[in-house]
Amino acid sequence: MAQKKASLACSECGNRNYQMIPTQSGQTTRLEIKKFCKNCNKHTIHKETK
């Protein structure tokens, strides 16, 4: 069975830089992490997308 993947998109430029496997704990809110964006060349908030 294939696992579901979610991408993390930069909140400023919208580029999807990172991929992750979401947890199945009944989480209703989307993950927000401050990570480095190579297009913006700075640390920005990345939000979970499908």
Image: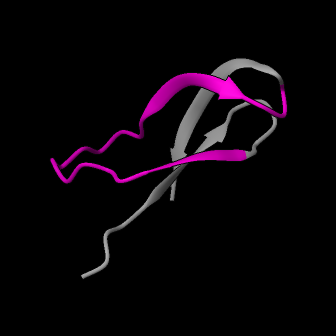
Q: Position of residue 11 (x, y in %)?
A: 69, 32
Between 43 and 49, which is closer to the camera in this rendering? 43
Does residue 16 appear to the left or right of 29 in the view shown? right
Its colouring scheme is: one colour
In the image, farthest residue toward the left: 25
Q: Position of residue 27 (x, y in %)?
A: 24, 44
* Residue at x 36% of width, y 67% of height: 4
Q: Quadrant of residue 2?
A: bottom left
Does residue 23 appear to the left or right of 38 in the view shown? left
* Residue at x 41% of width, y 40% of height: 30
Q: Position of residue 16 (x, y in %)?
A: 67, 48
Up-down relation of residue 33 to residue 43 (above or below): below
Between 25 and 21, which is closer to the camera in this rendering? 21
Asked if the magenta segment contains residue 26, the reply would be yes
* Residue at x 48% of width, y 29% of height: 32
Up-down relation of residue 1 to residue 41 (above or below): below
- Total marks placed: 0
* Residue at x 24% of width, y 82% of height: 1
Between 14 and 17, which is closer to the camera in this rendering? 17
Asked if the magenta segment contains residue 39, the reply would be yes
Q: Position of residue 49 (x, y in %)?
A: 54, 51
In the image, farthest residue toward the bottom: 1
Between 19 and 29, which is closer to the camera in this rendering? 19
Does residue 8 appear to the left or right of 27 in the view shown? right
Magenta region: which residues? 16-40
